[in-house]
Image (tube, rainbow, N blue to C red):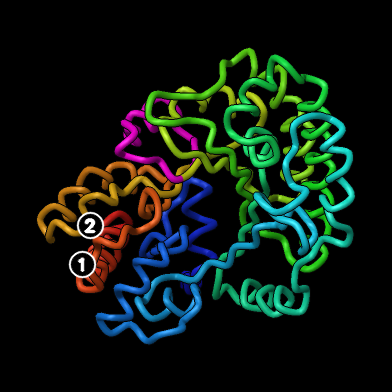
Amino acid sequence: MASRETVRSRFRKTIAGALPSDRLPVIEWAHWWDATVARWEGEGLPAGLDTSEIKRYFGLDVDYQLWFPQATSDVSPGSEGWQVRDEADYCALRPRLYPDPVPFDRELWQQRAREQAAGEVIIWATCDGFFWWPRVLLGIEPHLLAFYDQPDLMHRINQDQADYIVRCLDDLCAICIPDFVALVEDMSYNHGPMISADQFERFIAGYYRQVIPRVKERGIIPIVDSDGDVEPLIPWLEEVGIEGILPLERMAGVDVNRIRANHPHWKMIGGFDKTVMHLGEARVRAEFERLLPLMRSGYYVPSVDHQTPPGVSMEDYRDYVRLLKEYAATACG
């Protein structure tokens, strides 16, 4: 007799390329916009629910995300003393970065680890990546110029970040092993990557090569979180050991079925065009039909291709979840 599927077993089978015996995972990987939740509360959603409670309310599988903080609690982007223009500024700010011990609620995550061990939830961790983090420190335009004007600073920041990511994972893995780790980058916009392959290799790839083996040796799946047209990035990421990507934005021209044809074992989460969620069942069903071949191929967890927008009513969202569950079962049938 086959063993009973759980939230975690479905996810782990699917992302590894197999299909569960009953259905694919039904998850919402991204938190909802505050405005979306506020609208739903006006339409009957109980007020004050946290993210996991909202997921349970709609009958979704529960996943817990730990996004590791980068700084002490008294400083954040935009606050006094944050601005980094050069190495001197970075040296002045650095004592308030990469806190030790890593600040997360260990008692809470021990409790969540017990839920994970029982198969009831998925756990994943998010770390700022080697394109994202220097941009947070420097600002968008200065960051892009720093590839040319301040290469030593860029390497210093990314080496510090690589060391911090390893320490974050060491601390979490002392409690539980996350099912996957997402390195958040947002390295593309609608017209493709914001840097060249040469700049990626010079400034970013080496730090992935330090971190990714430490991730994989624990059996954790490493993926990248990047908006925009990510298809040109995939060969770069594969070369440094990354195994997948989210959220696969349709409006940026991402074609998940083309990705599957070109990268048969590439792991994907997301891909459902959020812009059709409020357009009625026929449009939502058509979008699931577009994704169904990918759903049947393995290595793919269907979900919205970014946060659900506030134009989606609670009734619209219930219809989306109902159809997600239907197609999650159809894919395994």
Residue 114, horizontal then vertical, whole percent: 68, 78
Q: Which mark is residue 236?
A: none
- Disc 2 from disc 1: Cα separation: 7 Å
Numbered tag placed on residue 316 in the rendering: 1
Q: Which residue lies furthest to the front in this view?
A: 80
Identify whether 320 is placed above or below 97. below
> The disc labelled 1 sits on which kind of residue?
Asp
Residue 126: x and y, percent? 64, 53
* Location of mark 2 (residue): 277
Quarter containing the C terminus: bottom left
Residue 85 lies in the magenta stretch: no
Q: Say left or right for 90 vs 212.
A: right
Please provide percent x and percent y for residue 269.
45, 48
Please say if 261 is above or below 148: below
Can residue 103 be seen here? The reply is yes
Q: Which residue is drawn at 36% across and 28% down?
A: 261
* Residue 251 lies within the magenta run: yes
Q: In this view, does 93 lie above or below 42?
A: above
152 left or right, relative to 331: right
Mark 2, secondary structure of its residue:
loop
Viewer-side residue, 155 vs 316: 155
Q: How crowded is mark 2: few (under 14 residues within 10 Å), some or many (20 or more)?
A: many
As shown in the figure, which amino acid type bears the numbered disc 2? Met
Residue 299 seen in the current view: no
SS for callout 1: helix
- Foreground pick, 117 / 228: 228
Locate residue 139: give its quadrant.
top right
Do residues under tags 2 and 1 come within 8 Å of each other at their CB atoms?
yes
Q: What stretch is highlighted in magenta?
A: 247-267
